Amino acid sequence: MIVASLDHWRRYCAGPLWERAFGFLAHAAADITDGRHVILGDDLYANVATYEPRALDGARYEAHECYIDIQYVLAGGEWMHVASRAPLVPAGPYDAAGDVRFYAQGDEAYARVPLLPGTFAVLYPEDAHMPGLQGPYQGTVRKIVVKVRMAALPPFRHADSSS
């Protein structure tokens, strides 16, 4: 997981697909319409939603296999819990069409992340997350979730430390 200000996205850039994703976020108008926005076919797209944050009671973690989430708040604010998905108990089967598996809450260790306007969170497949939670913030949330298909990213190469 990465959480940072959109002003610093270049520190985390991992190639052309990331540049397109963050370029979309940086230039998104405040009145962008809700729904799906195709950026680069199925490899890169955004879902925009307007909603009221929900209570923690009954909320579930979610995690993805094929896509990385870049969650960015345009307006309002929410809490998001993030935990390693490894120890979590699945709360149902994997939905390949939606690229999501839900997990039950338990006694897991988690980070509580505030998402406020101008802040983004990058969530990898190992990052189970429970977004959209009520917190100390008031009002409706407008959020963009950019989906980055993992298979479209170039392979990560570690720097050779022997030179």
Image (tube, rainbow, N blue to C red):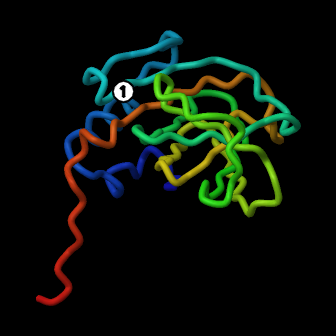
Q: Is residue 32 above or below residue 83?
A: above
Given residues 91 and 24, the one toward you in this image is 91
Given residues 132 and 67, the one toward you in this image is 67
Q: Is residue 62 above or below residue 106?
A: above
Q: Quadrant of the C terminus?
A: bottom left
Q: Amino acid at mark 1?
A: His
Instruction: Pick out the residue farthest to the right.
Output: 57
**Residue at (67% x, 35% y) in the render:** 92
> Image check: 40 left or right of 32?
left
**Residue at (44% x, 15% y) in the render:** 36
Instruction: Pick out the residue farthest to the left.
Output: 163
Instruction: Pick out the residue farthest to the front.
Output: 93
Residue 126, percent from left and from top = 52, 54
**Residue at (51% x, 43% y) in the render:** 120
**Residue 156 found in image quarter:** bottom left
Q: Which residue is mark 1?
A: 27
Residue 161, percent from left and from top = 20, 85
